[in-house]
Image (tube, rainbow, N blue to C red):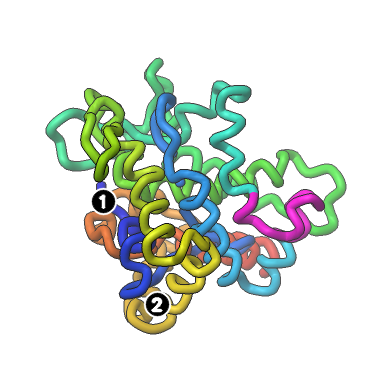
Amino acid sequence: MMSCIFSVVLGAKEAMGCGRIQIITLCSLLLLFPVIHGWGTVGHLTVCRIAQSRLSKAAADAVKQLLPAYAENDLGSLCIWPDHVKFIYHWSSALHYINTPDNLCNYQYNRDCKDENGEKGRCVAGAINNYTSQLLGYSSHSSQPKYNLTQALLFLSHFIGDIHQPLHVGFTSDKGGNTIDVHWYTRKQNLHHIWDDNIVETAEERFYDSNVEELVDAIKQNITTEWADEVKGWEACSLNKTACPDVYVSQPHMKEIHKPCCSLTISSTLNLIIHCITTP
């Protein structure tokens, strides 16, 4: 399913938008199959930087409290963390993607959200639901939370990015484009790698002098200008849910490759989480 990152990187000077979550409203950009590396470092950093800038004060305070001191309150700097630990936390590898049946251009949670052993709920959509639920237990006054909420924050931010990467929700047979070799200019790469890294990095280099901060600023500007009319749609979740990964996978904007909706989804989700736990 096509998502919002293509233009986030290649067309950020012409368009912009994305994000949702109220306990920590945070919607940003990244990964898919065990042999894949989802949005690369630049992609995930960009998504999370934009998302963090759109948090409510309560959500921003919660994120600051949950991030380790060495991150210096920069969520983007740790958004790639789930990719680094999946080789240690082997159980987390299946949470970066969804495999759908070959030749069926649709997604169904009950049919498709499972790992290679058939265990239900173990896919990126299930992970988003799980870590959203964990964060709903956040309290600034709790000294012994039931879950590791720092990890929950990082997993959620990363997985919302992953689910917006077109090839993280793809056909089973080609492993999300990992078995499809193509040429990106003079380089031969698999299709998944091109979506994860090459598109974003080429845009950063050619349009922003390899300066990721300029890329982030360009997208943030377009969110408030050219894409402003679409922001509410990107942030909205149906049925009053805090997070709605099935919508992220299936809704029409996932087929439009020029919209940076993932950052808005993260921020919106985090904002909603905080709102839910602070409102009587």
Q: Is residue 118 left or right of residue 148?
A: left
Q: Which of 39 and 164 is in front in this view?
A: 39
Of pointers 1 and 2, the one earlier in the residue sequence: 1
Q: Secondary structure beneath disc 2?
A: helix
Amino acid type, mark 2: Asn
Which residue extends farthest left?
Answer: 103
Q: Distance between the residues labelled 1 and 2?
A: 20 Å
Q: In this view, does 130 lie to the left or right of 201?
A: right
User: Residue at 23% of width from left, 30% of height from top?
Assistant: 181
Q: Nearer the viewer, residue 25 or 28?
A: 28
**Magenta stretch: dominant SS?**
helix
Residue 72 included in the magenta stretch of the image: yes
Q: Name the residue under label 1.
A: 2
Disc 2 crowd rating (10 Å Cα; few below 14, some 14-19, many 20+) is: many
Amino acid type, mark 1: Met
Label number found at residue 222: 2
Q: Give the range drawn in magenta.
A: 63-77
User: Residue at 83% of width from left, 51% of height from top?
Assistant: 142
Residue 210 included in the magenta stretch of the image: no
Residue 68 in the image, given as x and y percentages of width and height:
77, 49
Label number found at residue 166: none
Q: Are marks 1 and 2 in contact (CB under 8 Å)?
A: no
